[in-house]
């Protein structure tokens, strides 16, 4: 059995079975997801159509009564009577007009409450109160009359409200409208009603499985519901704190907020139709919302698509897909056996002959397809192998000579590159402080400049005045090697320009000018996604050596006093030239008096960031401070060697991490003699 499946045919049979199973499962899952998507899409369309239908039915049933009610409260005669209730002539005319409205209202009933007296007038379809329409006086302490006072308090034009009236012993959908005088004051509440039981049956209730209807007002309060029990609770509850809101039916708090925002947008006139998904009673439902701005109501239809459109409806399609897949795999298997496997078996037998040394054997190319090309390539390979076996020694010699020649060209290219880099170091050295200038202006100093590569991104320079004053600069540019060296050349040129504009006495102004120039250069000529700039420390020393004026961009000035205490004067936190800083960036200056015995140190962060020691940590400020205190009593000229030895010892076998520049200097001051 194992032997049967070691060959290509057996493995192919297993592969076909596995592919059929995998594709079948994937197709089933894909079909299920597509079917669910179709069901969801159809459910959305069904819910939308249902909601629009409900809106049309509601508007058709209520809008006529609402228009008539608004016309009633705007009647000049009724407005005049509400302001002069006890005028017999006006009252008689008002009753006649109200009687005409009773005849055309669908419910053949009306009510009219005068605000000044709270007198309640009404008549019904049986004309039961004809001739004695006054029924009672609304009292605020009577719970059954609370609707009237709540309407006066909260309603500006009209409202639709299901209400149980104990005085009339009826449950209706009341249309409560406000009548106003010429000054806009509320003078009456009037309206009519609709039979709420019939309203629910024709508008809200549905016999369709998986469909639930709701009616809500602008505040989210449920005005109608498919459940008769919920509807009864709504009719008897007038307390806004306990009345049922649609948000209470939604399980997910995030969906509640989304629904609240959507209804607010509808109220603001952004849209009248919306579709979303809500979780109600632990089940996901498609919700279609249709807003009725005329009534300030919204019809919400909740649809469970799995009950409206069942998955079993797609079973014939699934059976057809499975049969088509099986037929396709059988057809592919037959074609593969005929066009591939049989021909590969011939090629396999030929490989055994070639392995036995029969290089004169070839196969006929019977078709110009991939296997035919493979057969042709195999025949060519057989002849080539035969040639190689006969001429192998000569070919090895030829390849060796070609490799040697390539190595020589590579070595020559490397030599030319290194010559160029060494010449670049010579060019870069030309911008650095001259040793003779340092010796002349700073007899006591120590200088250490160690690029990580042949060239680097650190540089130091010195600007001198005729009177003996000078400006000292130590800089750390972005990058190492050749890119860093290019940055030093550009930065040095811009620094020369900034010093010529602002002079040596104002190092902070020089920093600002350099920042603007370098930022403009990098943005306009060499714009890229990478940030570039430099950290820089400037120290101005006047001719009398009485003080130092220091300005730094991230680089500090270290001061070692006569007792070996080290004070670090920090530079500003902003580097120079970076695009994230604006052109109006300003730098600060610090002026300190010089003292006999003090040493001053400028250094880039290459020393502090050098990794080494037993645990591979950075060298840090503490070790450098300890060295400066330790070397305090020794000549300043020896300090550079001490720093170099400490770095070599600390990093051990680790490579140099960054370019390093270290400059220490001191003054032998004679306050009485003047400048030294």
Image: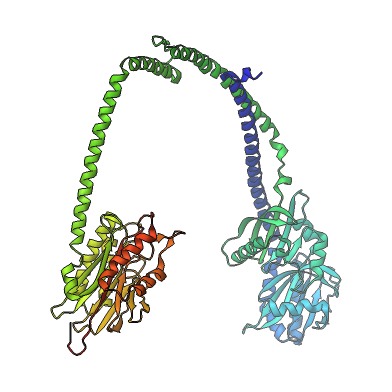
Where residue 562 appears, as percent x and y from the top left, is 32, 82
Where residue 63 appears, as percent x and y from the top left, is 68, 64
Up/down of 280 relative to 141, above or below: above
Q: Is residue 133 left or right of residue 417?
A: right
Up/down of 217 relative to 595, above or below: above
Where residue 463 appears, as percent x and y from the top left, is 19, 73
Viewer can see residue 490: yes
Please tell me which residue is depicted at 40% across the width and 64% down the height of the picture: 619
Please tell me which residue is depicted at 29% across the width and 77% down the height of the picture: 599
Extreme residue toward the front, this view: 634
Along the line of sight, which residue is nearer the eye, 16 or 109? Answer: 16
Up/down of 157 relative to 308, above or below: below
Where residue 503 appears, as percent x and y from the top left, is 20, 77
Asked which quadrant contains residue 173, the reply is: bottom right
Viewer can see residue 606: no
Along the line of sight, which residue is nearer the eye, 100 or 201? Answer: 201
Q: Quadrant of the N terminus?
A: top right
Asked which quadrant contains residue 593, the reply is: bottom left
Q: Is residue 237 left or right of residue 592?
A: right
Extreme residue toward the bottom, this view: 672
The count of marks equals 0
Along the line of sight, which residue is nearer the eye, 418 or 518? Answer: 418
Colour mode? rainbow
Along the line of sight, which residue is nearer the eye, 187 or 584? Answer: 584
Extreme residue toward the left, this view: 466
Q: Quadrant of the C terminus?
A: bottom left
């Amino acid at each position: 059995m194992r032997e049967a499946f070691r060959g290509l045919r057996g493995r192919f049979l297993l592969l076909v079975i596995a592919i059929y199973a995998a594709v079948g499962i994937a197709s089933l899952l894909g079909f299920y997801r597509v079917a669910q998507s179709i069901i969801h899409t159809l459910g959305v369309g069904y819910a939308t159509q249902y909601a629009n239908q409900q809106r049309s039915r509601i508007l058709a049933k209520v809008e006529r009564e609402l228009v008539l009610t608004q016309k009633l409260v705007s009647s000049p005669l009724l407005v005049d009577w509400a302001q002069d209730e006890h005028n017999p002539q006006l009252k008689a005319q008002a009753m006649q007009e109200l009687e005409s409205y009773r005849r055309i209202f669908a419910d053949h009933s009306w009510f009219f409450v005068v605000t000044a007296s709270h007198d309640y007038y009404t008549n019904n379809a049986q004309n039961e109160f004809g001739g004695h329409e006054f029924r009672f006086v609304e009292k605020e302490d009577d719970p059954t009359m609370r609707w009237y006072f709540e309407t006066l308090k909260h309603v500006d034009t009209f409202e639709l409200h299901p209400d149980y009236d104990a005085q009339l012993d009826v449950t209706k959908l009341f249309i409560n409208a406000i009548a106003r005088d010429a000054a806009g004051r509320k003078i009456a509440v009037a309206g009519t009603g609709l039979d709420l039981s019939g309203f629910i049956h024709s508008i809200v209730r549905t016999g369709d499985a998986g469909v639930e209807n709701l009616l809500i007002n602008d505040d989210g309060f449920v005005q109608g519901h498919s459940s008769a029990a919920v509807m009864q609770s709504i009719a008897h509850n007038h307390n806004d704190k306990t009345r049922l809101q649609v948000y209470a039916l939604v399980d997910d708090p995030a969906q509640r907020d989304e629904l609240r925002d959507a209804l607010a947008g509808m109220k603001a006139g952004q849209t009248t139709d919306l579709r979303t998904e809500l979780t109600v009673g632990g089940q996901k439902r498609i919700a279609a919302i249709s807003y009725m701005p005329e009534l300030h109501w919204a019809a919400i239809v909740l649809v469970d698509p799995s009950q409206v459109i069942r998955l079993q409806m797609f079973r014939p399609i699934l059976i057809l897909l499975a049969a088509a897949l099986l037929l396709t795999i059988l057809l592919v298997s037959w074609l593969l056996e005929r066009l591939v496997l049989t021909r590969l078996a011939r090629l396999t037998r030929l490989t055994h002959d070639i392995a036995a040394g029969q290089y004169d054997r070839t196969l006929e190319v019977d078709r110009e397809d991939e296997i035919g090309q493979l057969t042709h390539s195999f025949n060519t390979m057989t002849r080539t192998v035969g040639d190689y076996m006969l001429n192998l020694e000569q070919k090895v010699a030829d390849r060796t000579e070609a490799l040697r020649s390539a190595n020589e060209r590579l070595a020559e290219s490397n030599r030319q590159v290194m010559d160029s880099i060494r010449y670049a170091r010579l060019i870069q050295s030309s911008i650095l402080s001259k040793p003779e200038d340092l010796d002349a202006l700073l007899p006591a100093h120590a200088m250490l400049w160690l690029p990580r590569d042949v060239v680097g991104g650190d540089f130091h320079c010195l600007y001198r005045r005729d009177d003996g004053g000078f400006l000292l600069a130590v800089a750390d540019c972005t990058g190492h090697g050749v890119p860093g060296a290019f940055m030093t050349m550009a930065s040095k040129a811009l620094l020369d320009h900034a010093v010529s504009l602002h002079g040596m006495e104002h190092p902070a102004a020089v920093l600002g000018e350099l920042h603007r120039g370098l930022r403009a250069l990098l943005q306009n000529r060499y714009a890229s996604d990478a940030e570039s700039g430099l950290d820089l420390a400037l120290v101005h020393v006047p001719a009398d050596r009485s003080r130092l004026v220091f300005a730094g961009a991230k680089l500090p000035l270290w001061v070692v006093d006569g007792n070996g205490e080290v004070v670090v004067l920090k530079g500003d936190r902003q580097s120079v030239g970076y695009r994230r800083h604006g052109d109006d960036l300003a730098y600060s200056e610090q002026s300190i008096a010089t003292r006999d015995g003090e040493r001053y140190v400028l250094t880039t962060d290459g020393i502090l960031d050098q990794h080494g020691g037993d645990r591979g940590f950075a060298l840090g400020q503490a070790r450098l401070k300890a060295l400066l205190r330790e070397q305090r009593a020794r000549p300043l000229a020896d300090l550079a060697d001490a720093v170099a030895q400490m770095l070599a010892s600390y990093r051990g076998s680790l490579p140099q991490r960054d370019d390093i520049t270290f400059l220490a200097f001191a003054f032998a001051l004679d306050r009485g003699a003047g400048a030294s």
